[in-house]
Image (cartoon, rainbow, N blue to C red):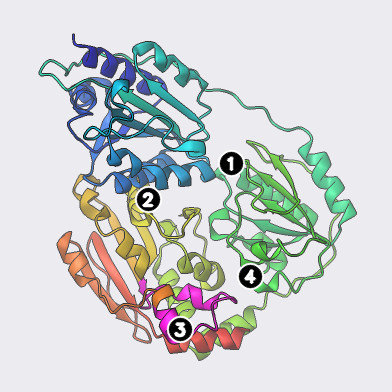
Amino acid sequence: MSGNSKLAAATLGHLTGLGISQFVVCAGARNAPLVTSLIAARTRMGLKIWHHFDERTAAFLALGLSRAENGPVAVLTTSGTAAAELLPAAIESFYTGTPLVLVTADRPECYRGSGAPQAIEQRGLFGIYAPLSVDVQNCEDLNWAVRWDRRSPLHLNICLEEPQADDHIDDFEGVIIPEQESENDEGIPRRVAEFVRVYPETVCLLGALPHKWRKAVREFLKRSGLAFWAEATSGLRECDELRGQQVVRENGIASIERGAVLRIGGVPSARFWRELEALRGVDVLSISPHPFAGLARRSELIVSPDFPSEIGVPRAKREVDPVTKQLDAALSKFPCSEPAMMRLVSELVPEKAMVFLGNSMPIREWNLAATMSPHPYCFANRGANGIDGEVATFLGLSHREKDSWGIFGDLTALYDLNAPAILSQLPKGRRRFVVMNNGGGRIFSRLPAMSQLDIEVKSVTENHHCHRLKAWAEMWKMDYVEWRAGKPAPEIEGDNVVVEVVLDNSATELFWKEMA
């Protein structure tokens, strides 16, 4: 057995020992020993192998698969800049606590700093975004993988010699690597109760919630009676039991008399959250499964794997005006506006369907305008730049679903045009790629600092375009439906369908003026 064979066997043994049974492969010459060994052992070890030609897309596909499985998934690349393409997904994984494993093949250590072909400085390539990065020169180096906490990316950089004819093997076995247990913070109920007693006008902001948190958070809100705003990914936006406490509009949060803000879950997308940076007099307490305060200014953060089932707090006595009448009136008055069309899209989505909201406008407009019919399987990327890898993440999440709806902006779709190459490997199912086409990144016009820019500057910052996506659908053998704003909803038939919603930007501008 060659040195490459031994290292490949040890690497794959450790990966399966981490509980990984799904691998997304971007094949190349340098990682051939890993790929051939993996394929040879696929049937015997019950492994699932996906493959894609684009490393960036492959990494986001792995991210979606990991979320769907609620467990670790690995993406394998060859050496050089191919490895660097994993960085965007590594960032997303880092901020969302998704257990993504980045396996990069590398040339031997002696090539570092040489400028030789396909040799870049891969050791520690992902910096802080892969807190555990193991440079694997020999089999013993892999023992460091036992330190992985499964709450952030793991990077294994495998140094391999030139591939040889005898590099492939099929006799590796999984190395049992126990999962690290985390302890609950027993002080959470006491701290939250104290916070609410000091600030009885506390407002709750719900970001993305793990499924295991949702029942406990719902019961806490019911007992406390606190006003709250809910992200669609919290799973509580459409909760009938909490309707009288819920703030529907993002800017409605600011109108509430508040003493403090209690954030539960991930960092919210609500604009008001960003405004808290300047509201230094408003105390903020965050309870989150992730170690990120979400604010640059002083605030308090408690990180916990679970949300306590019992928190004793006095019940708030306050009615919340959800401003639904004003919202419904504006949607009716401007039926061609983007929020009105989002309302119509949401009415087409079956309650049991998986929904993925591709940032940036879709998630905000769904939060505002979508029907209140329950959609408990709603996902979104944190979106460190807003729109990277969204279609690929959606496809990864959809692989076990019978009915999946991805809702994207037009630039989001253009960023990820090659993602549907994976469709031929996915199980059969109904997938809807809804693209809200407003001719560019119109969200920038809604930012106070950019709304007054002149037309030429706006055309650049918003990336104005006149593209339509019918050819995209045809390229990947998807069906295509065009839905123009103001027209009745079209019939949508077939398995993989692109639904291009062509929007009326003037109506959208009038809608937001009405809601101001």
Residue lying furthest top in this view? 1
Horizontal and vertical percent position of residue 239: 61, 60
- In the rendered view of the protein, which quadrant contains the C terminus? bottom right
Helix, strand or loop at label 1? It is helix
Which circle marks residue 337 in the picture? Answer: 3
Horizontal and vertical percent position of residue 245: 72, 65
Give the amino acid type for the residue marked by disc 4 in the picture: Glu
Give the amino acid type for the residue marked by disc 1 in the picture: Lys
Which circle marks residue 250 in the picture? Answer: 4
Helix, strand or loop at label 3? It is loop
Q: Which residue is mark 1?
A: 212
The answer for how far apart the CA atoms under marks 4 and 1 are is: 26 Å
Q: Which residue is mark 2?
A: 393
Q: Nearer the viewer, mark 1 or mark 3?
A: 3
The answer for how far apart the CA atoms under marks 1 and 3 are is: 36 Å
Tell me which numbered mark, 4 or 3, is placed earlier along the sequence.
Answer: 4
Which circle marks residue 366 in the picture? Answer: none
The image quadrant of residue 338 is bottom left
Say which residue appears at 31% left-offset and 13% top-offset. Answer: 173
- Identify the magenta region: 436-459
Between 269 and 395, the one lying in front of the other is 269
